[in-house]
């Protein structure tokens, strides 16, 4: 097994950064565990997204602690937190902010003043993002990709780091609007929250019906989190694994020669190159989070489904046969040959 000390001349500083990364991650999990019960896989995916610098979409039924999870993680990170409650009457200016006319009391002159919207934060919770029409949903597009927003021709840079952690209800529920494909593609992960086990639900009832109230203590800061994002990008990946990630994404496109028959039958649109980039980045963060200094095959396969489930569009054949995206992706993982060690 190769280590960072073998790969970088400044080994001592790098090793110190790795140890700090592991301590901070464990401290974050310890803080979040005071409030959140279960959902280990989702928590792992959200932290991977944060350490990569990507955005995360949380999908689940009402009452599965999506909003509580995001707020608790933001508190543990020690970052500026903003919440936007998406509703059918929400306007784009309610997200980005707007210019207003103010009068100088001393001179009587009027001038335009920009009032910052809730998008100007480090961790932005877009709560129930699919409860608002596409026009308002699109107000997040520039912020998520360019880390800036444009109002009346003026470009305003957002603070770094910047994360959008969005929650949405299943689209079958009343009063929901499907997210545009261009916006879905901006999310690194689409993490799904399911109902807890009976034992975990009993723990939740015990935690939330007593008098004790856990206090979340920040364990890191913005500058350190940016350093962690650079550290993750230094994790090496074998060329064979990178090719495997690219091959798997290419196999999701029904017009590609490498696509299996079930993809050609059930899939309308496959993943773009951004999907392959996100798979590799997420696999690097997962490897480092599990105290490995290189990407393994298991790291790749563990992130494929949450990276691709919102990027694959199925056709009416899949809908009529009640085949979902996750089953297609799991079949694809089994179909694409595993790279040689």
Image: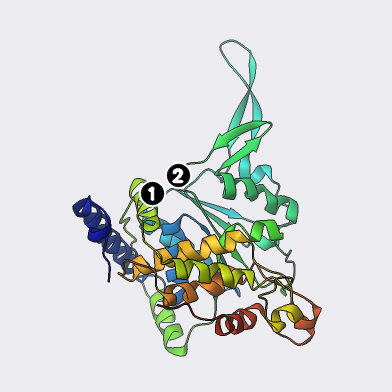
Q: In front here: 201 or 8?
A: 8
Q: In front here: 81 or 290?
A: 290
Seen in the picture, residue 179 relative to 38 is either above or below; the reply is above
Q: In front here: 175 or 337?
A: 337
- Residue that appears at 58% across and 15% down: 105
In the image, farthest residue toward the top? 107
Who comes first in sequence, dot 2 or dot 1? 2
Seen in the picture, residue 23 relative to 38 is either above or below; the reply is above
- Residue that appears at 64% across and 50% down: 141
The reply to whether callout 2 and callout 1 are in contact (CB within 8 Å) is yes
**Which labelled disc corresponds to residue 333?**
none
Task: Classify mark 1: helix, strand or loop.
Answer: helix
Task: Classify mark 2: helix, strand or loop.
Answer: loop
Seen in the picture, residue 146 relative to 77 is either above or below; the reply is above
Q: List x then y, in percent, for residue 288.
A: 34, 65
Which color scheme is applied?
A: rainbow
Q: List x then y, in percent, for residue 79.
A: 40, 50
Q: Quadrant of the N terminus?
A: bottom left
User: Label 2: which residue?
Assistant: 160
Q: Is 152 left, or right, of 3 in this rendering?
A: right
**Which labelled disc corresponds to residue 226?**
1
Residue 211 image-quadrant placement: bottom left
């Amino acid at each position: 097994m190769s280590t960072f000390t073998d790969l970088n001349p400044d080994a001592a500083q790098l090793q110190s950064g790795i140890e700090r990364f592991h301590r901070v991650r464990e401290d974050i999990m310890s803080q979040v565990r005071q409030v959140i019960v279960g959902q280990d896989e989702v928590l792992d995916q959200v932290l991977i997204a944060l350490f990569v610098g990507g955005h995360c979409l949380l999908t689940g039924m009402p009452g599965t602690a999506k909003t509580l999870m995001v707020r608790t993680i933001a508190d543990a990170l020690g970052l500026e937190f903003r919440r936007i409650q998406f509703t059918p009457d929400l306007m784009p200016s309610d997200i980005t902010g707007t210019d207003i006319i103010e009068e100088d009391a001393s001179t009587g002159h009027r001038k335009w003043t920009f009032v910052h919207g809730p998008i100007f934060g480090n961790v932005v919770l877009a709560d129930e993002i699919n409860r608002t029409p596409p026009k308002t949903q699109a107000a997040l597009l520039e912020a998520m990709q360019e880390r800036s927003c444009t109002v009346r021709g003026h470009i305003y840079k957002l603070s770094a780091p910047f994360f959008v952690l969005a929650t949405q209800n299943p689209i079958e529920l009343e009063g929901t609007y499907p997210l545009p494909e261009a916006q879905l593609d901006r999310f690194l992960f689409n993490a799904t929250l399911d109902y807890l086990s009976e034992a975990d639900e009993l723990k939740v009832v015990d935690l939330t019906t007593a008098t004790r109230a856990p206090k979340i203590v920040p364990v890191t800061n913005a500058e350190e989190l940016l350093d962690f994002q650079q550290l993750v990008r230094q994790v090496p990946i074998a060329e064979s694994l990178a090719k495997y990630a690219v091959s798997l994404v290419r196999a999701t496109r029904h017009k590609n020669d490498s696509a299996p028959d079930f993809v050609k039958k059930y899939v309308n649109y496959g993943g773009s190159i951004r999907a392959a980039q996100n798979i590799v980045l997420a696999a690097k963060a997962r490897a480092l989070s599990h105290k490995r200094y290189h990407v393994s095959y298991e790291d790749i396969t563990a992130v494929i489904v949450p990276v691709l489930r919102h990027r694959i569009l199925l056709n009416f054949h899949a809908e009529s046969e009640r085949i979902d995206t996750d089953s297609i992706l799991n079949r694809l993982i089994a179909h694409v040959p595993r790279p040689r060690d």
